Amino acid sequence: MMKRAIAGGILLSALLLLFYGCSAAKPKSPAPAYEEPQYAWGNITGRTLTVWGRETDLSRSYMTRAFARYEELTGNTIDAVAYTPDQLEAAAAEALQRGSNTPDLILSFGGTNIDALDPDQNLYDFSAAEWVDDLTEVSINQTIYHGKVIGLPHWEASIAGTLYNKEIFEKLDLTPPRTQAEFLTACETLLQNGVTPLYLPAASPTMLLYQLPLDTLVEQTDTLEKLNNGELSYADLPGMQQVADWYRTMAESGYLGASYLTNDWDGMSDALESGEYAMMLCWDTWLYTDFQGDASRFGLMPAFVGIPENGTFEGPNLSLMLVNRHSEQMDAALDLITFMADPYNYNAAFEGIYTAPVFKRQVAGISTPQYVEAERWVEENYRDSTAWLRIEGFSQSDATCILHYMQAREGYTAEQCLRDMDRLRTERIHKR
């Protein structure tokens, strides 16, 4: 799925309590508790608002519900314009840099992901908005950019790790691994029994998810600061070479299958549904937003990507509704944000959606059975999303260097791979 000013010192237990509560899986979410609006909105009508976002993000059911409800209750129209991830950043950055009044709003993940948008100059500051106090500690953390609340987190909250096919594990008498060595042993057992251990959509490099182990290396504030100010590089981080080597080991051992280089995002659902693959790095809510099969067949365990020894679960990345300060319809754009931040409306949008609360007054939505089943395990190995959100110049697309290392036979080392990733990251910072 932000930057710099981070609300510090959140205890893990408090974080998980705020985020997931003392929840248990319920057959359905409770009815929304708010029968009338809590904020003032809807006095603007007859407008068409343009929202830019990634196609997969704009099509989320809770987004389409919110937009449809807004249109119905206000008489305004939402023109949702879909882009690929790379197209969105380039198009939005170009539009904002020239001061265009289009789009009116942008749906995007925050943190370093919006550096190219120059938020200080181009995006509305919501720090004084009345709905800010309704955000959980975890979600407000993700809205911060240079000390300001830069957007509304209207998104599902998930836990990332490894999805695994419980039926395959039970059939082969496999216990979900607890260590890196046990994970590789499970991979070998699966392979010997004709099952490809891990579906890796390498044709979509952003899905290598190398940020999962990287979170553990930058969770210390001083390490993150040194990486961001140039005192450290990826190649200097203890354990980062181990991460690169893990990907190469998985490829060379056949644990990713023969076609991993052509596997892509669009094939993820079919791959897991087919039973040809036993596991996939992903997040729990994906089973309910994108997966076309029976989600109950799958469990959630940590991501064992070389480090840390006992694997890791990553906290959520929340997409934000951002407002273009150059928009000639800022009044209507802010009206839409206030509408979406109102518990009267967001509880209707998230009714029945598998998610942890993003808002304190969020009563619709339920924790995934996968989270509930692994709750104790998550508590033991949880890490907040840090690398993807806080490292200057970070990009999931830099995993192309890891892919090159996975295929290289001679003359390209893990250190060179990491140096190339550092170079791409540095170039990205300078361009911004």
Image: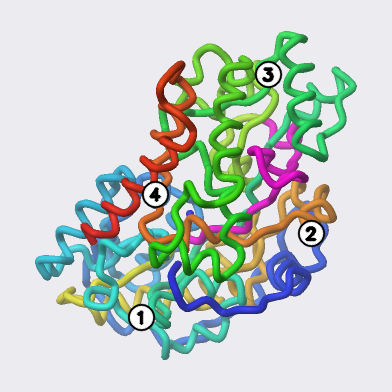
User: Could you tell me if the residues under marks 1 and 2 are in contact, i.e. CB atoms within 8 Å?
Assistant: no
First in sequence: mark 2 vs mark 3: 3
Write down the region rendered in magenta.
294-319
Q: Which mark is residue 395?
A: 4
Residue designated by label 3: 275
**Which of the two labelled residues, at mark 3 and mark 4, occupies the earlier sequence position?**
3
Compute the Cα span from label 1 to label 2: 42 Å
Q: Can residue 319 be seen in this view?
A: no
Q: What element does badge 1 sit on? A: loop
- SS for callout 4: loop
Which residue is the site of mark 2? 379
Q: Distance between the residues labelled 1 and 3?
A: 49 Å
Q: In this view, does 234 lie to the left or right of 321?
A: right
Residue at the spot x=52%, y=76% of the render?
Answer: 6
- Earlier in the chain: of badge 4 and badge 1, it is 1
137 in relation to 175, above or below? below
Nearer the camera: disc 4 or disc 1:
4
Callout 4 amino acid: Ser
Kindly indicate whether the residue at mark 3 contacts the one at mark 2 (C-beta within 8 angstroms).
no
Would you name the residue on which mark 1 appears? Answer: 42
Q: Neighbour class for label 4 at 10 Å: few (<14), some, many (≥20)?
A: many
Identified by mark 2, the residue type is: Glu
Taking the image as drawn, is residue 212 in sight? yes
Q: Is residue 73 above or below residue 163?
A: below
**Residue at left 50%, top 51%?**
236
- In the image: residue 136, left or right of residue 43: right
What x and y, as percent, mark residue 56? 41, 44
Q: Nearer the viewer, mark 1 or mark 2?
A: 2
Badge 2 crowding class, 10 Å Cα cut-off, few under 14, some 14 to 19, many 20 or more, is some
Task: Name the residue nearer the viewer: 357 or 314.
Answer: 314
* Viewer-proximal residue among 44 and 258: 258
In magenta stretch: residue 249: no
